[in-house]
Amino acid sequence: MASQPPPFQVLEDGTLTSVPGIRATGVHCGVKKKNLDLALIYSEAPSVAAGTFTRNKVKGAAVVVCKENLKTPGIRAIVVNSGNANTCTGETGLENARRMVHLAAEVLSVRPEEVLVSSTGIIGKPLPMDRIEQGLRHAGKTLNVWGDLRGFDFVEQGHLAARAIMTTDAYPKEVAVRLKFGRKTVTLAGICKGAGMIAPNMATMLCYLATDAAIPPALLKPLLKEAVDRSFNSISVDGDTSTSDTVILLSNGLAGNAPLEPGSKEHEKFREALAFVTRTLAQKIVRDGEGATKLIEIHVTGAMATEEAHQVGMTVANSVLWKCAVFGGDPNWGRIAASAGRSPARVKQERLCIYIGDQQVFRLGEVGEYDLSKAEEDMKGEKVCVRVDLGMGEAEWTVWGSDLTYDYVKLNAEYHT
């Protein structure tokens, strides 16, 4: 039976500014020696907003301030700098994060509490606020809140914003989709950054999502949490969890649809579209993992609970031995079995089955009869698929990871923190 097509269209060259009412830009202000390092995102209408953040006990000042302002009913803007995480900088760091908010509010003619803020990069250094102020004034002029927008290239400026939030990323990460709510057209889009320090509970990653759909606050937050759990909280590059992780979703309501209702067809359509957007961005992060050459997909089935399926998947994804085996193209399923067995989940060896590609290599506690050359061939592609069947229950989860390469060690040995 043919699968149903998704209820949305993926936009060619889509970016955050594909969403009506969303403007953005990126500039270089000197936080980094070169390349864009300051992004400014603006919503023409007050937006319902939801966010998820790092669970690291050491948090960046921007995370603290962003959480404070997220309580405001109508968010209008987000300011982001890259190259400096503004973390472990004490009261000065908090003052600087709030200063960024006030500066952005000034250039956009909005209230400071309507502005969210993020910072990413090196830990332990104060922000160069004089440079950030100059950059924000430049970005504000580009967005031209009260002026003529006929010369404003929304797509190109959106791409600049996606580049401005990058640190060790090799390329910007963007996606946009369009769907129908009856006669109304709705757009959902996102940009993100991340390439290293990627682990469960998000990672050294920032993500900004926007939609013109009208979504009540009580519905927006659970929608975002579910999508983040199945995407950004299900990826790993190196097992480290950052201090600055942030995912924000803005809903400005300019599509003019009736506000979503739980369980409605429109709710399910948006839920599916949001899952696609966040999963696509999460996989882009893993594919861009520092030094990575392969994407690893680990599908865990037969668990007693979804949390346990997640635990098994992340334990395998974080196994240094398995990641090295993937880099070397070695179908060493024993490393998968060992990882599953040391996870916190309930695992019984006599029920465990492991697949590499579509081939069963371990069955019910014993080595399966399999074609080694085919398993080796399955390990050669840019995407390596593994399935771990616990044989215990009905719960499942999918996680994504990357291989561990010489370049990862070299890059992080030379990256000053």
Image (cartoon, helix red, strand yellow):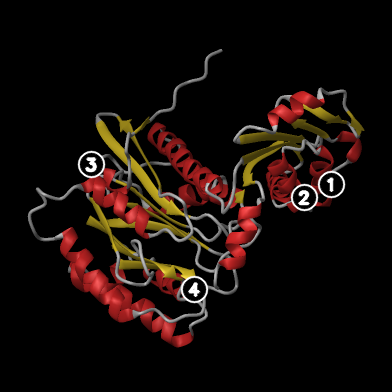
List x then y, in percent, for residue 108: 19, 66
Who comes first in sequence, dot 3 or dot 4?
Answer: 4
Who comes first in sequence, dot 4 or dot 1?
Answer: 4
Distance, label 2 to label 1, CA atoms, is 10 Å
> Is residue 238 shown left or right of residue 274?
right
- Residue at horizontal 33%, vertical 61%? 36
Decide: few, some or many residues near mark 2? Use Cα within 10 Å; few <14, some 14-19, many ≥20. some
Q: What residue type is labelled 4?
A: Gly
Q: What element carries label 1?
A: helix
- Asked if one can make out residue 257 in the rendered structure from this viewpoint, the answer is yes
Who comes first in sequence, dot 3 or dot 1?
Answer: 3
Q: What residue type is labelled 1?
A: Ala
Query: Which dot marks residue 321?
Result: 2
Distance, label 3 to label 2, CA atoms, is 52 Å
Q: Is residue 47 positioned above or below 266 on the image?
A: below
> Is residue 325 shown left or right of residue 296?
right
Query: Which dot marks residue 256?
Result: 3
**Nearest the camera: 329 or 43?**
329
- Residue at horizontal 48%, vertical 85%? 90
List x then y, in percent, for residue 192: 43, 52
Who comes first in sequence, dot 3 or dot 2?
Answer: 3
Asked if the residues shown at circle 3 and circle 1 are in contact, with their CB atoms under 8 angstroms apart, the answer is: no
List x then y, in percent, for residue 272: 46, 36
- Residue at horizontal 32%, vertical 55%? 161
